[in-house]
Image (cartoon, coloured by chain):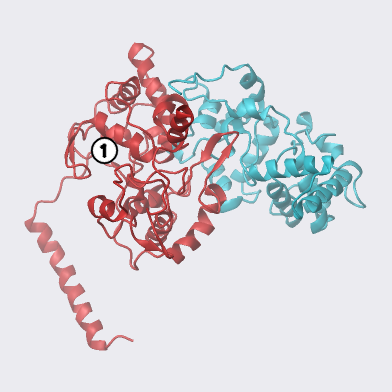
Chain colours: A cyan, B red
């Protein structure tokens, strides 16, 4: 997260022309190049906006994920995995293969610099310590299923699933089809298990009903979270 | 190269000892296995006035900075170490702790009630202040524990109690090896400087050392305790994936860093060390990488101290 915040500050700083640390203009330039590729493509690289939307918001109906605000390291790693086949995706594979390292870096920096599709401040205040008994998705998301060694999703993806730092992507508001597709891909070992093999192993311990429930939960979360009351401040000073 | 005679002598000794083991077992009565216990399902908190207090305890347990902020000096959660909201075996589960109090504790040399034990969590692990024993915070946490221990036998160590102690490592725990284990397995979540990660002010991955972590009085600053916790529970969802040696080494590395001062500090690191940290497995007061641990600690109290200073202005 810190990385993203720094980046945002740097980009803003460049606009107002204030003195900046040495690396900042280079970074902003990289993101700008990324923005050009995203909007217009480059040679064999199809313009990202075609499927991921004008503002990186994705296309939920088609199962194309949002990219806006995701960690640049995460995004770059995914492009590399599409290219190598570690993440199996027939649409992304040829596109990623035709990108060079600089282009990958630029596009990842660009999407990381865009504001997320949800209200991150409100959503990260979301706290549901005791979901209704039958709400399987909410239980998995907020408390996990430790009988299967499955931690709560929010323990790595952050409260409300808003994403954490460079390596734990936001999942709130991704389409149910996309989330389910990814969890199944991990379960069937068609997607690289990710850092430390964490996500691949966790998905393998989930059953399909749990996968469907938790995908539905996060797909719908940004809306109810906006309506939810902020938790009582308790005995805070 | 060791002299052959030494190796031979050791082998004989090992043989002799292994031969002795069954004989000893025959003479001494085998210890009864620790009773198994399963807490009530987490969805089964009763929907009544008592249940409301249990829920309150669970809320405090999961997010103490929000629900008991007056007594909490860092951003850690009780559930940072007590996995699955205090339900998980081998992660110091609450149901196993509940049935062991009141208890004599060498830490303070007297019989502690459960309330006093819980106060200790706030003072040390949460780097905060003791909630009064009759405060709602303590009543709520006790209610949560009592509910979770329903039907458990009292006064016995249940299977899964505490963190399973590890046998002594083959090699003495080592900073450099620990650093390597840390970089490979821990940095992803806890950050390169052990500072943890938050999002919009909400802690996600706890700080392992530094001002935002537990203080020098917390149980987790002891290397055997940390090694036991890490082995059984870390990396999250991959418990028991590290070797014993790796768990010892990385526990040493974690606890070889500075953290908030021990609340029992009396102005002298030497005296505090002799009085409360006189164990080889406790690095407080020891010189690591040229610096005496505890000598540069921020006074205990974290956010509470900062808030008190603001009020004083």
Name the residue located 77 percent from the left edge and 50 percent from the top edge. A24
Name the residue located 88 percent from the left edge and 50 percent from the top edge. A45
Residue tagged 1: B36
Q: Is A73 on the left or on the right of B301, as rendered?
A: right
Which picture quadrant has residue A175?
top right
Nearer to me, B188 or B235: B188
* Residue B157 percent across, percent down from the top left: 21, 40
Nearer to me, A152 or A55: A55
Which picture quadrant has residue B69?
top left
* Residue at the limit of the structure toward the front, as seen here: B313
* Residue A46 percent across, percent down from the top left: 88, 46
**Residue A191 visible to an observer of this rendering:** yes
**Residue A216 visible to an observer of this rendering:** no
* Residue B298 percent across, percent down from the top left: 43, 46
Q: Is residue B86 above or below residue B285?
A: above
Quarter the N terminus of chain B occupies: bottom left
């Amino acid at each position: 997260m810190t990385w993203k915040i720094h980046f945002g500050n740097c980009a803003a700083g460049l606009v107002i022309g204030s003195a900046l640390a040495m690396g900042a203009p280079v970074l902003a330039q990289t993101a700008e190049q990324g923005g050009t590729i995203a909007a217009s493509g480059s040679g064999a690289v199809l313009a990202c906006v075609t499927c991921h939307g004008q503002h990186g918001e994705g296309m939920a109906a088609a199962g194309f994920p949002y990219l806006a605000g995701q960690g640049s390291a995460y995004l770059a790693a995914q492009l590399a995995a599409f290219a190598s086949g570690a993440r199996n995706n027939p649409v992304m594979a040829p596109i990623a293969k035709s990108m060079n390292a600089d282009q990958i870096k630029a596009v990842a920096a660009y999407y990381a610099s865009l504001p997320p599709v949800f209200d991150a401040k409100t959503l990260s205040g979301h706290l549901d310590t005791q979901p209704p008994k039958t709400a399987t998705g909410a239980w998995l998301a907020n408390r996990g299923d430790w009988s299967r060694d499955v931690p709560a999703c929010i323990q790595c993806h952050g409260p409300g699933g808003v994403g954490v730092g460079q390596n734990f992507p936001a999942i709130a508001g991704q389409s149910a089809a996309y989330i389910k597709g990814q969890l199944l891909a991990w379960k069937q070992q068609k997607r690289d298990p990710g850092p430390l093999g964490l996500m691949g192993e966790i998905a393998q311990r989930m059953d399909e009903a749990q996968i469907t429930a938790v995908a539905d939960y996060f797909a719908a979360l940004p809306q109810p979270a906006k309506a939810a009351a902020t938790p009582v401040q308790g005995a805070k000073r | 190269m060791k002299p052959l005679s030494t190796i031979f002598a050791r082998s004989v000794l090992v043989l002799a000892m292994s031969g002795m083991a069954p004989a000893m077992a025959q003479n001494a009565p085998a210890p009864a296995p620790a009773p198994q216990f399963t807490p009530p399902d987490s969805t089964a908190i009763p929907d009544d006035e008592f249940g409301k207090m249990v829920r309150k305890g669970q809320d405090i347990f999961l997010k103490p900075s929000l629900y008991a902020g007056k007594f909490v000096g860092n951003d850690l959660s009780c559930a940072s170490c007590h996995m699955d909201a205090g339900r998980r075996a081998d992660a110091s589960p609450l149901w196993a702790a509940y049935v062991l109090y009141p208890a004599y504790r060498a830490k303070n040399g007297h019989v502690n009630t459960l309330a006093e034990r819980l106060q200790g969590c706030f003072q040390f692990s949460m780097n905060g202040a003791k909630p009064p024993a009759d405060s709602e915070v303590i009543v709520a946490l006790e209610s949560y524990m009592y509910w979770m221990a329903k039907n458990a036998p009292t006064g016995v160590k249940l299977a899964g109690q505490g963190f399973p102690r590890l046998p002594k490592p083959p090699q003495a725990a080592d900073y450099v090896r620990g650093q390597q284990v840390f970089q490979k397995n821990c940095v992803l979540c806890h950050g390169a400087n052990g500072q943890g990660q938050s999002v919009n002010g909400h802690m996600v991955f706890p700080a392992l050392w530094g001002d935002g972590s537990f203080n020098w009085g917390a149980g987790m600053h002891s290397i055997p305790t940390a090694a036991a916790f890490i082995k059984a529970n870390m990396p999250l969802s991959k418990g028991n994936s590290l070797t014993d040696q790796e768990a010892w080494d990385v526990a040493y590395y974690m606890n070889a860093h500075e953290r908030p001062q021990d609340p029992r500090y009396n102005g002298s690191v030497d005296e505090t060390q002799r009085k409360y940290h006189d164990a080889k497995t406790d690095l407080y007061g020891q010189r690591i990488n040229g610096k005496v641990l505890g000598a540069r600690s921020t006074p205990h109290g974290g956010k509470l101290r900062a808030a008190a200073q603001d009020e004083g202005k």
